[in-house]
Amino acid sequence: MAVSINNVSKYYGRQKALNNISFTLNSGEICGFLGPNGAGKSTLMKIITGYLDEYEGDIIVNGKNLRQYPLEVKAATGYLPEHNPLYPDMYITEYLLHVTRLYHTPNAMQRVNEIMEMTGLLPEKNKKIGQLSKGYRQRTGLAQALIHEPDLLILDEPMTGLDPNQLEEIRDLIIRIGKNKTVLLSTHIMQEVEAICDRILVIDKGNLIADKPKSVFHHTGSGGMVLKVSFAPGNPTDWLSEIKGISQIKRDGNDSFRLLSLPGHDPRIALFEAAAGHHCPIIELREESNLENVFKELTGKNNSLHT
């Protein structure tokens, strides 16, 4: 199973939403698709799945061009859109049987039972979709995307709104699915990208700006520790530049900053002592993952305060 995205561009009027995007996806690969809001992620996913049919370039799935073989490509693709449109008045089994009819799936009831077992829906199978928790609604969305046994699975923000337990369950499910399918996963949750994905694509302003294995991202960037710190509102913070071991300070909101340490330095104790000395309460302090740091560097989402 291989997917090739070749020189894909998309315009909305005169506005260019995608600019000459090209990459390939391989069988058994879970590929994270990252980008700021409005970067073009959902637009490209809708093009790959055939939801948008006016674009430049080519989408090739299993050797078939989407323009020439739309039904074959759609049959090989499962799609969970960001807002997961479901029918709240339908029972889970009823809904999945409805989906099998759309795909002309043979042995429909057997397949519905198989997919409910795979996605952990069996305990809830006698409930209406509107009675389900957010986690089980996401499972139902995944079940409809998988019911016709597609080779390619497109997941647009499947973790949105889930609690920690639900996140872990959906993450484990996607990892299991990804062993036998090609998965393109869009999410804003960096920890999930690190836990799930083998490879990462980054898009910004319609341009593909990075395409690397996850391991490469962990060895990319400035090499120092990145700290996210937030202070109680209304306190002066010009003293931050006096802390030893900090090489860069970037504002990340009115009272929040990202601090980059020199390689080998951990400035947290010095930061606490300085904040106490200046009577400036810290309300949040956490270390960012290197992937999160690299993503922000690539997409330029922070305005430099000190360098």
Image (cartoon, helix red, strand yellow):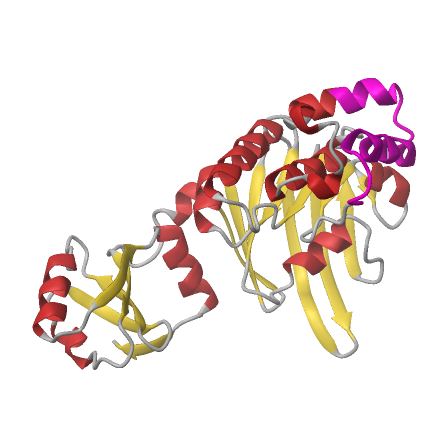
- The image quadrant of residue 116 is top right
- Percent across and percent down for residue 276 are 11, 69
Residue 198 visible? The answer is: no
Frontmost residue, 208 versus 49: 49
Frontmost residue, 44 versus 132: 132
Left or right, residue 91 beside residue 205: right
Frontmost residue, 121 versus 274: 121
Residue 157 visible? The answer is: yes
- Percent across and percent down for residue 152 are 71, 37
- Percent across and percent down for residue 196 are 50, 38
Does 88 appear in magenta?
A: yes
Which quarter of the rendering shows the C terminus? bottom left
Left or right, residue 235 beside residue 79: left
Identified at 17% across, 75% down, the residue is 241
Report how many numbered discs are placed on residues in the image: 0
Left or right, residue 260 beside residue 40: left
Frontmost residue, 63 versus 98: 98
Identified at 67% across, 52% down, the residue is 82
Task: Judge whether 188 appears above or below 258 on screen.
Answer: above
Task: Judge whether 77 appears above or below 10 on screen.
Answer: above
Which quarter of the rendering shows the N terminus? top right
Does 306 appear in magenta?
A: no
Task: Judge whether 123 appears above or below 170 on screen.
Answer: above
- Percent across and percent down for residue 7 are 71, 58
Main SS class of the magenta portion in the image: helix
Identified at 84% across, 36% down, the residue is 75
Identified at 56% across, 46% down, the residue is 159
| Magenta segment | 87-113
